[in-house]
Amino acid sequence: MSLLHFGIDRTQFFDAHYQSRWWLKRQMLSENNLNWKHIDQALYAMENANTQIKLFKDGPVEPGRYTEPYWELGEQRTRIVKDVLYRYLTDGATLVLNKLQLYLPEINDYCMDVAQFVGEKTNANAYAAFGGDGSFGKHWDTHDVFALQLIGRKRWRLYQPTFELPLNHQTSLNHKAECPAEPVLDTVLAAGDLLYIPRGWWHEALPIADDETFHIAIGTFPPKLLDYLLWLCGNRLPDRIESRSSINAYLNTTDLVESFIPLLQSTLAEPENLHNFYIAFTEQQRVKSRFNIGSLSPTGISDNTALLGNKIRINSFLPISNDQKTLLANGFKINLDTESADFLAGIISADNLQANKNAKQLSDKENQLLKQLLILDLIERF
């Protein structure tokens, strides 16, 4: 069951917006129970791994200004000096919490909704402020961003791209003067609003005076065509003698390269190669999920209706479909018969969740399937 109501068909999104045009959706959260106490909990969990915690005020703030080293049990550690942190925030600094989905399950839930909507791996960086001038100024990102406002409000300005589809190393740092003067979008996001920004689009996010703000920037990370080409170079092309030819200054390399082009084209276009590449990419992916140690207790889940008292999700950035023959998630791959695939697709969909909750019980087969998938970390109960 999704917590985010996209209000747009996936096909329509890919046709009209994906990597080409921004998209704004107001009030897309079914419920928003996240508050500053959750941020406090995240800071508590992240403090001793504080390379993920950043402060920005007129540029990055040196961590030594708001942290201090100390010794505990024979080990040197670093802690945040809270009154200094609070003073920075009061004075207009922006607090950045990178990879927040690793520390707050509630944030990971939003990431998984986006991941399964676009079929791509996600990551969430978070930004908190109580006024100020923002953190990064006008810039582009090298990945698509779904900006989800969760507390307060923030002003966003978007500008046309001047360098399309940048890769990781192609940042906007040395291109600031190229940003267009006039924005194509100038709007304020309130809690529950979401803004999709394709990679390469200039943008700036500005806190509003006398207003609090907390939003997450959910980045998506698909494999690129270059990744596919590199995979072919390591896994398919070495099998062809043409690719193993030597390049020598005394040889006619022009003819050699030209003779290789048809093979490269046919190898790139081979559907089986593309399918195998994507399977290999998916097999390497892992997603964060909650633990279920309590289910091992004799007082844990003891009947076959309790499992449906929770929302259930596949631990993969790819959603499950009724006609799916295999389930691949978190390094495990299992075969599914038609009955099992229909059952899983049904209980995970929002439309059928309540109907399954109201059912008297699961069959023994369905009950055992869910419990086994939980143990193998292929599904998550939340």
Image (cartoon, helix red, strand yellow):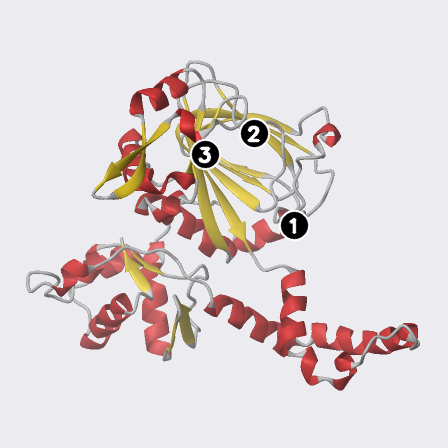
Marks 1 & 3, CB-CB < 8 Å contact: no
Seen in the picture, residue 173 relative to 111 is either above or below; the reply is: above
Nearer-N-terminus badge (1/2): 2
* Number of residues whose C-alpha sits closer than 10 Å to that of mark 2, classed few (under 14), some (14–19) or many (20 or more): some
Give the image quarter of residue 305.
bottom left
The residue depicted at 32 percent of the width and 69 percent of the height is 343
* Number of residues whose C-alpha sits closer than 10 Å to that of mark 1, classed few (under 14), some (14–19) or many (20 or more): some
Q: Label 3 belongs to which residue?
A: 193
The residue depicted at 58 percent of the width and 73 percent of the height is 275
Seen in the picture, residue 57 relative to 194 is either above or below; the reply is: above
Seen in the picture, residue 32 relative to 367 is either above or below; the reply is: above
Q: Distance between the residues labelled 3 and 2?
A: 21 Å
Q: Residue 64 carries which label?
A: none
Q: Label 2 belongs to which residue?
A: 136
Q: Which amino acid does label 2 sit on?
A: Phe
Q: Can residue 239 be seen in this view?
A: yes
Q: Is mark 2 on a helix, strand or loop?
A: loop
* Number of residues whose C-alpha sits closer than 10 Å to that of mark 3, classed few (under 14), some (14–19) or many (20 or more): some
- Furthest residue toward front: 74
Who is closer to the viewer here, 117 or 159? 159
Who is closer to the viewer here, 189 or 97? 97
What percent of the width, then of the height, locates residue 116? Answer: 45, 56
Give the image quarter of residue 160.
top right
Q: How far apart are marks 1 and 3 (CA)?
A: 27 Å
Q: Which amino acid does label 3 sit on?
A: Asp
- Furthest residue toward left: 299
Nearer-N-terminus badge (3/2): 2
Mark 3 or 2, which is nearer the eye?
2
Nearer-N-terminus badge (1/3): 1
Who is closer to the viewer here, 13 or 155? 155
Mark 1 or 3, which is nearer the eye?
1
